[in-house]
Image (spheres, helix red, strand yellow):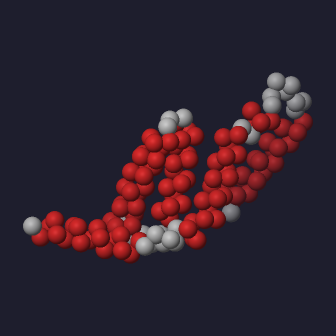
Amino acid sequence: MFASAVMLVTAGLIAQKTWIRPANPREHWTVDILPRRVVLFVLLLVGYGLALNTVGFIPTSLVFLVIAIRVLSKRSWFFATLVGGLSLLLIWLIFRIVFTVLMPEGIVPEAELIQLFRNLLSTEVGR
């Protein structure tokens, strides 16, 4: 509660000083204040949050990662898809299989994937 009050007071002081200060003619709103990349990521995050429960964790995260990697790295779509897919597989394996964190299933039959990994691991251990 105290931290929230401190943040609110300091935000008010910063806003007051910003309004008093004269505008810099060299600053442009779309370049310096709110660039397109920031707007894109805000829209991506909002879309990710909206689609997560209906579409599911795996496809939603894959789309988000591929677009984010493509935009930030400025590499090819192939590179972004490869890195995003491998990253998502690693994240999913660690959090869903190792830590057993429940994630929104959506359109991907996640229970069948988990059983497939368990079967693969049990046949490898049994040999």
Residue drawn at x 22%, y 67% is 121
Q: Is residue 47 visible?
A: yes
Relative placement, left or right, of 5 versus 113 is right
Judge whether 124 appears above or below 91 on screen: below
Residue drawn at x 70%, y 46% is 39
Relative placement, left or right, of 119 versus 55 is left
Judge whether 44 appears above or below 120 on screen: above
**Numbered-mark total:** 0
Q: Quadrant of the C terminus?
A: bottom left
Q: Where is residue 30, by image quadrant? A: top right
Residue drawn at x 81%, y 48% is 12
Relative placement, left or right, of 7 versus 20 is left
As rendered, which of 60 and 12 lies closer to the eye? 60
Q: Quadrant of the N terminus?
A: bottom right
Judge whether 64 appears above or below 120 on screen: above
Q: Is residue 104 visible?
A: no
In the rendered image, residue 63, in percent from the top left (x then y), is placed at: 54, 54
Q: Where is residue 35, by image quadrant? A: top right
In the rendered image, residue 55, in percent from the top left (x then y), is placed at: 55, 68
Judge whether 42 appears above or below 94 on screen: above
